């Protein structure tokens, strides 16, 4: 976070004022600020639809087709995608990549940004009235064109963030100077600053993983979770707590609010060799936010932001949150005793794991 930002930003400040202040510092910043404002506008519209729930019809209803990665599209997925596209059309976004679109869409050919979006993350939770969200990543558009604009290391992002539609609507984003945390005021439909320079607790006793996949996991993940489950009687000597919302954006927000570690690892199921989550519009922006908050994000072993996508809907294993836990998991991956799929003496590892 810059010293200016520390001094200038005050609780309750409007998003508009925050962005005006930021973009005034540099001529090149205006288009990124406009994208953040456009996404906020789309998010406020999506939040209003979600708040009405079934009164507007069955928003969680499957509409019979699957998106490019095989997920069933729901009515709200499409509606959210349309809200985001129409807001971004009014910005200088050259290229748009979406979970809901097969290929990159050119919006304004002479624009200077490329925006990747998961318009409605966690959509299987819609009808259960559980938090869902919008996740986005912004790159500078490359003179080499649409593909080159996205297929590059995540550390080149200009901005990243998410909106979570929960009991209230939260908007967290980073412009590379720390994490800003806004909440939607339902009375005025404007976002107001809660805090700037959010930090993730470095250590935690809470983890999030879909434990029903236990039998498919590789040994580093099994060992980490086994150790947590053994609690005070195991090698870690302390008790842990587990959460799984099945809505990435909601898990991320919980980790921002009170620490924790999230894991969606690669596993042995066909099609899960690279986990479940997508690099461009899920892992990249979350990794950017998390690092800006002092946390860490890896694919288990390697930093997410060092990876380059080679295809639009490419998956990546994802581990992120409190830095100490993410480092511990990476140390399990890098431990040669785990490099076999099912070591015969695995059950005895408790004797020598630290
Ligand atoms: O977008 C993918 C997603 O819905 C995430 O929000 C969530 O973390 C994950 O999939 C849940 O996956 P699963 O149903 O395999 O637990
Ligand atoms: Mn998603």
Image (tube, helix red, strand yellow):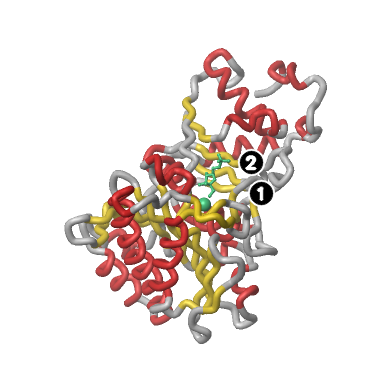
Q: Nearer the viewer, mark 1 or mark 2?
A: 2
Q: Is mark 1 within 8 Å of ligand 1?
A: no
Residue 143, x across and y down, in percent: 60, 83
Comparing 49 with 180, the one in front is 49
Quadrant where the N terminus sits is bottom left
Q: Secondary structure at mark 1?
A: loop
Q: Is residue 51 left or right of residue 175?
A: left
Q: Is residue 196 visible?
A: no
Q: Is mark 2 within 8 Å of ligand 1?
A: no
Q: Which residue is mark 1?
A: 302
Q: Is residue 274 left or right of residue 133?
A: right
Residue 120, x across and y down, in percent: 45, 55
Comparing 287 with 121, the one in front is 121
Nearer-N-terminus badge (1/2):
2
Residue sitting farthest toward the bottom: 110
Quadrant where the C terminus sits is top right
Q: Residue at x 57, y 57 (%)?
A: 65
Task: Quadrant for residue 340, please give it.
Answer: top right
Q: Is residue 254 left or right of residue 112?
A: left
Residue 147, x across and y down, in percent: 64, 73
Kindly check if marks 1 and 2 are in contact, taking CB atoms under 8 A apart as contact: no
Residue sitting farthest toward the left: 187
Comparing 334 with 276, the one in front is 276
Task: Quadrant for residue 326, please give it.
Answer: top right
Q: Residue at x 73, y 20 (%)?
A: 349
- In this rendering, the answer to whether 175 lies above or below 169 is below
Q: Secondary structure at mark 2?
A: loop
Q: Which residue is mark 2?
A: 265
Residue 309, x across and y down, in percent: 66, 62
Find the distance from the CA under tag 1 to the CA under tag 2.
12 Å
- In this rendering, the answer to whether 180 lies above or below 237 is below
- In this rendering, the answer to whether 93 lies above or below 337 is below
């Amino acid at each position: 976070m810059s010293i200016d930002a520390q001094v200038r930003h005050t609780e309750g400040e409007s998003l508009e004022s925050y962005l005006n202040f930021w973009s005034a510092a540099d001529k090149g910043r205006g288009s990124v600020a406009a994208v953040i404002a456009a996404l906020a506008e789309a998010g406020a519209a999506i939040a209003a639809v979600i708040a009405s729930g079934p009164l507007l019809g069955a928003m969680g209803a499957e509409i019979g087709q699957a998106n490019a990665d095989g997920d069933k599209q729901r009515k709200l997925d499409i509606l959210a995608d349309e809200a985001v596209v129409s807001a971004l059309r009014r910005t200088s976004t050259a290229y748009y990549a979406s979970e809901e679109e097969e290929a990159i869409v050119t919006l304004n050919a002479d624009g200077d940004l490329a925006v990747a979006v998961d318009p409605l993350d966690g959509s299987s939770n819609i009808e259960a009235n559980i938090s869902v969200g919008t996740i986005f990543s912004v790159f500078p558009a490359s003179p080499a064109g649409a593909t080159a604009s996205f297929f590059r290391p995540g550390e080149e992002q200009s901005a990243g963030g998410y909106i979570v539609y929960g009991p209230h609507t939260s908007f967290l984003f980073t412009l590379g100077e720390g994490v800003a945390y806004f909440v939607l005021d339902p009375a005025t439909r404007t976002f107001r600053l809660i805090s700037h320079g959010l930090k993730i607790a470095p250590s935690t006793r809470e983890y999030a993983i879909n434990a029903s996949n236990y039998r498919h996991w590789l040994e580093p993940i099994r060992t980490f979770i086994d150790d947590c489950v053994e609690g005070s009687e195991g090698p870690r000597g302390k008790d842990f707590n587990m959460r799984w919302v099945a809505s990435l954006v909601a898990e991320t927000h919980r980790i921002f609010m009170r620490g924790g570690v999230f894991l969606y690892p690669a596993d042995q199921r066909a099609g899960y060799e690279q986990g479940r989550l997508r690099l461009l519009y899920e892992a990249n922006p979350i990794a950017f936010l998390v690092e800006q908050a002092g946390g860490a994000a890896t694919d288990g072993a390697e930093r997410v932001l060092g990876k380059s996508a080679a295809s639009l809907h490419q998956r990546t294993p994802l581990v992120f949150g409190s830095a100490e836990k993410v480092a511990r998991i990476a140390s399990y991956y890098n431990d040669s005793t785990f490099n076999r799929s099912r070591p015969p003496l695995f059950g005895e590892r408790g004797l020598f794991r630290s």
